[in-house]
Image: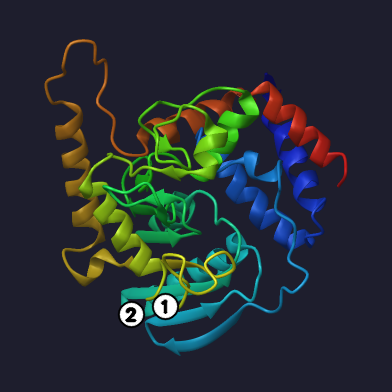
Amino acid sequence: MQISIRELEELTRKAVASYDYRDEEIEIISDCLLFAQLRDNNQGVVKLIDKGIPKDPNAGQIEIVKETPISAQINGNKNHAMLVVGKAVAIVKEKAAKTGFALAGTFNTNTSSGAIGYYASRLAQVGLIGFAFGRSPQRVAVYGSYEPVFGTNPLAVAIPADPDPIILDMSTAATSYFGLVEAVTAGRSIPDDMAYDAEGKPTTDPQKAIAGAIRSFDRSYKGSGLALVAEILAGPLAGAAFCGLGDSRGNWGHLIFAIDPDLLAGREQLKNHVGEIIAKVKSTKKLPGVEEIFIPGERESRLTRERLVSGVIEVEDNLLTELRKVAAKG
């Protein structure tokens, strides 16, 4: 169903408000959700339906528990991950502006941080190369197994470029959990090589996949290995749980870091050379049926601009119906 972006923004804010967040929290969470929705990323407003994003009654102050001139370890104290990781990005920006490199790890959150590329892109917008990793409760099987052991463990890298940053934003799993929720909501099946049911049999039923395990993004040992690396960086390095050990469902983790190109070749030289790389890649010989070669994030950034110019966006009918129900409570 087609809806105006203005109405979608209003529905999103009202839906977030229905979970008792404060005004400034509503703006931060809504901005992250709409970033994803405008890019056709399944980390958008689908998060507001089903179980939604209720505010944890035990949420306390977001606290820096360990800090150096280039780093910060942040206890989220059960606040929504979008708020905690947003604070991590702000800290990394500030520190990197002084030192050229900075990192922050977050722990003790129990909700999804949304589109991981959102955070990396915020760093690229100020001239930094941004990196973001996340881990969550175990839903993904290691290669050769059907038992869930890793989270969907997304990662993102954003590199300054014109007119938009290069944004590699990917789950190390074949789909995110909310990709399965979207499929359930829309009443559609999933590819037969995406997930296993609880008995280890391939399934096209997203509900059975939720009860079973998702495969790695490339269905091979390489994707499984990348998921392991993300699990370590956003889990034990950040101080969070990992692989079902510890409070895996209540202690999610993230790692954010940034590099200032001026530490090495310099911002302008990097940006110029990145532009040359983009031009070279896009000009390579195309296979039959291929109209254009895309750089990571290019298609999504272009789609966002087109939607903002037109002022309208398509939202799946059932999802929009459920979003309106949640917004009505706000």
- Occupied quadrant, residue 207: top right
For mark 1, what is the residue?
95
For mark 2, what is the residue?
99
Q: What's the distance in space between the residues labelled 1 and 2, CA to CA?
A: 6 Å
Say if mark 1 contacts mark 2, CB within 8 Å: yes
| Image location (x, y in percent) of residue 109 | 59, 68
Relative depth, front residue between 148 and 294: 148
| Image location (x, y in percent) of residue 98 | 37, 79
| Image location (x, y in percent) of residue 89 | 48, 66
Q: Is residue 11 visible?
A: yes
Relative depth, front residue between 217 and 132: 217
| Image location (x, y in percent) of residue 158 | 35, 52
Residue 72 lies, with reference to residue 285, above or below; the image says below
- Kind of residue at disc 2: Thr
Residue 258 lies, with reference to residue 297, above or below; the image says below
What residue do we see at 71% from left, 78% from top?
60
Disc 2 on helix, strand or loop?
Answer: helix
- Occupied quadrant, residue 280: top left
Relative depth, front residue between 280 and 41: 41
What residue do we see at 56% from left, 27% from top?
307
- Kind of residue at disc 1: Lys
Relative depth, front residue between 262 and 88: 88
What residue do we see at 52% from left, 29% from top?
205
Q: Can you say which quadrant of the picture contains the N terminus?
A: top right
Disc 1 on helix, strand or loop?
Answer: helix
In the displayed structure, does residue 229 sit left or right of residue 210? left
In the displayed structure, does residue 200 sit left or right of residue 229? right
Q: Is residue 256 visible?
A: no
In the displayed structure, does residue 21 sit left or right of residue 201? right
